[in-house]
Every structure is written in structure tokens, then in C-alpha cells.
């Protein structure tokens, strides 16, 4: 019986070795695939960081250009519209913006009173 037990033990050991070989091979394959995935994830993280840095740099560049444009605008004198005098004798047809008007005779009388007061005080 001893040889039969020995043969059975040898067969079991051989079967265990045969069974373990594919499992060890699968572990190596899965380990390799895991390493590949981890490397891809690391590359994607680095790419995301690089893209974020690029966006931040472009944003800073836009802000700088806006600030420079604002400074240049401050250095220019303001545009003042020129007011051209009306030719003598020309009267506006309508009062501007609906403001109340004073008749010319009333203005002339008021002007004469002011001049009389100023001449009397001298």
C-alpha cells in the first residue's frame, strides 16, 4: 500500500502544481494589466494638470491684456465734443430737452435792472 499512497500523493502534488501554474500566470497577467492601467491613470493625471496650467496661463494673459487696455485708456485725454456757436441771429426752433424758456424782452428788462443796480453801487 505504500506505493499506492506515494503514487496518490505524487498525483495530487502534480495536480496542485498544474492547477497553480495557470493561477500564477493569471496573477502575472492581471498584475501587468493593473500596472498598465495605473500608468495610464498617471499619464491622464499629468495631462489634466498640464491642461489646467495652460488654462491658468491663458486666463492670466487675458487679465493682463485687459489691465493694459484699461491703463492705456486712462492715459488718453477724454473725448470732449466740440460745441459750435450758432451764427448771429439764428434762433433754435425748439427748446432743448423741453426746458422752460424766457422771452427775450423779459431777459433784456432783467439785464437792465442788474446793470442799474451795479452802476448805482459804484
Image: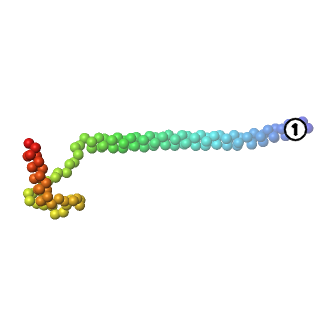
Furthest toward the right, the residue is 1
Q: Nearer the viewer, residue 85 or 101?
A: 101
Judged from the image, the secondary structure of the residue bearing numbered disc 1 is helix
Q: Residue at x 54, y 42 (%)?
A: 40
* Mark 1 lies on residue: 5
User: Is residue 22 found left or right of 3 in the rendered image?
Assistant: left
Q: Return the x and y of residue 63 as percentages of the image width and height.
A: 36, 42
Q: Return the x and y of residue 80 as percentages of the image width and height.
A: 20, 48
The image quadrant that residue 64 belongs to is top left
Label 1 crowd bin: few (<14), some (14–19), many (20+), radius 10 Å: few
Q: Residue at x 10, y 44 (%)?
A: 121
Q: Compared with residue 59, is residue 101 higher up or lower down, i.e. above or below?
A: below
Figure colour scheme = rainbow
Furthest toward the front, the residue is 120
State the count of labels: 1
User: Is residue 28 found left or right of 43 in the rendered image?
Assistant: right
Q: Residue at x 36, y 44 (%)?
A: 62
Q: Nearer the viewer, residue 61 or 39?
A: 61
Locate the N terminus by quadrant: top right
Q: Nearer the viewer, residue 120 or 11?
A: 120
Q: Residue at x 44, y 40 (%)?
A: 53
Q: Return the x and y of residue 37 as percentages of the image width and height.
A: 58, 43
Q: Compared with residue 119, is residue 107 higher up or lower down, i.e. above or below?
A: below
Q: Compared with residue 111, is residue 34 higher up or lower down, i.e. above or below?
A: above
User: Is residue 27 found left or right of 45 in the rendered image?
Assistant: right
Q: Return the x and y of residue 75 as percentages of the image width and height.
A: 25, 41
Furthest toward the bottom, the residue is 93
Locate the C terminus by quadrant: top left
Amino acid at each position: 500500500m505504500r506505493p499506492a499512497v506515494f503514487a496518490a500523493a505524487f498525483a495530487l502534488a502534480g495536480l496542485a502544481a498544474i492547477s497553480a501554474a495557470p493561477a500564477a500566470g493569471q496573477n502575472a497577467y492581471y498584475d501587468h494589466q493593473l500596472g498598465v492601467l495605473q500608468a495610464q491613470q498617471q499619464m491622464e493625471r499629468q495631462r489634466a494638470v498640464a491642461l489646467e496650467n495652460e488654462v491658468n496661463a491663458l486666463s492670466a494673459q487675458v487679465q493682463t491684456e485687459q489691465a493694459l487696455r484699461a491703463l492705456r485708456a486712462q492715459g488718453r485725454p477724454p473725448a470732449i465734443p466740440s460745441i459750435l456757436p450758432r451764427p448771429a441771429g439764428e434762433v433754435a426752433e425748439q427748446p432743448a430737452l423741453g426746458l422752460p424758456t424766457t422771452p427775450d424782452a423779459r431777459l433784456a428788462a432783467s439785464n437792465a435792472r442788474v446793470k442799474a443796480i451795479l452802476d448805482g453801487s459804484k
